[in-house]
Amino acid sequence: MHVHLDAVGGAAGDMFAAAMVDARPDYGEAVEAAVQALRLGDRVSIAFEAHSDGVLSGSRFRVACPAPPHATPADTVREWIAQAPVAQAVQERALDILELLANAEAEVHGIPVAEVAFHELGGLDTPVDLVAAAALIEAAGSPTWSCGALPRGRGMVKTEHGLLPVPAPATSLLLAGMVLVDDGVEGERITPTGAAILRHLAPEQAADFVPRRLLATGHGFGSSTFEGRSNVLRAQFYDPVDDELQGDQVAVLTFEVDDQSPEDLAVGLERVRAGDGVLDVTQQAITGKHNRLAVRVQVLARPQQVRAVAERCFLETATLGLRWTLTDRLLLPRSTVTVDGTEQSIRVKVAGRPGGRRSAKAEMIDVSAATSGRAGRAELRARAEQQALARTDGTHDGNERADRDD
């Protein structure tokens, strides 16, 4: 399972709960059980309500509770959650989100965490939002998380400490390292609770090139309204694609070299090949300007690491510029199996082909290191490939590993 969050309008605790349950209504029971476990009695009631702003339809998470006091110590909120008879995993997540909030407030105000008191977050809706978020994260199992760029917001927000710039100081600390964007819309877009939930989830914000099957989409509405934009947090649930042909994207970097000796270029390209994110490096002879012999280099790399790979190309070769593009590719599922050779282990790549057929290819570098002579290599290679096919015939071995990157 993979969950992607889009902060179209922003992110807050109630928006997260609403979006998750709007996508997966069956998760609502987990939220109700977790909130009841807080034992807040008649002071608090919750409801997931259908809502539409005329553009999108979704849900709102309503928490009815008394007006918050002037300030609630963080230790009090911690005690409410720690004493709640909820699943340990839910309790630990809720307490972790709370600690993220408390630590951020302590750093902002320059005080010990033990002295932190919540003002705007001092109501009973705060522990409700925290345990609701924790219960929903656990209900989803162990998904991976991602999110798009987060809206920075504009202007000032009124707090017990006076007017503060948006994002609020504690929110800014919690969002450190994340990608934000100014979309021109005024107002607070990410609340401290929303930021703490995002920090707890640690979502990936890089481009996602993994094919996934969309299962469900939910819209969680916030209480504010913005001109020309729905104030929703969108949650999308994905499953992996189970297919014979697996598709993804790779970055293709190309450049030419005509002023670097073959010996030194060979060394440089081997170092490029050994770098993180590089899938393959090839070169071919070409005729360049002034009819000079040159080399055209092509590097296949993971899209997320294209800039680091480009820097390595500039460092190890004499090229002054390169071109790169993203391209789609289809892959056969494959694994690498290690079998015993005469003198050393032989790695064999086994691929599943359409129609249920399988093929095997022994690593020639292992074969050549294990024996000498053309006939000996051919015999060893054939034997290793047969062993690998037999080993993977409906069974899995501890020496077998998935291999999709090359």
Image (cartoon, helix red, strand yellow):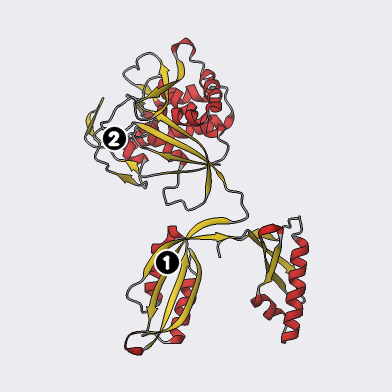
Of helix, strand and loop, which one carries label 1? helix
Of 332 and 318, the residue lying toward us: 332
Distance CA(mark 1)–CA(mark 2): 37 Å
Query: What residue is shown with label 1?
Result: 309
Please, what is the three-letter code of the amino acid marked with disc 1?
A: Val
Measured along the vertical axis of the image, is residue 388 above or below residue 188?
Answer: below
The tag earlier along the polypeptide, 1 or 2, is 2
What's the residue type where badge 2 is placed?
Answer: Ala
Nearer the observer, disc 1 or disc 2?
1
- Position above or below: 352 against 213: below
Q: Residue at x 45, y 47 (%)?
A: 204
Q: Which mark is residue 99?
A: none
Crowding at label 1, few (<14), some or many (≥20) Cα neighbours within 10 Å? many
Q: Position of residue 307 (x, y in %)?
A: 38, 63
Q: Residue at x 34, y 26 (%)?
A: 54
Q: Which residue is mark 2?
A: 168
In the image, 334: left or right of 126?
A: right
| Disc 2 crowd, CA 10 A, few/some/many (<14, 14-19, 20+) | many
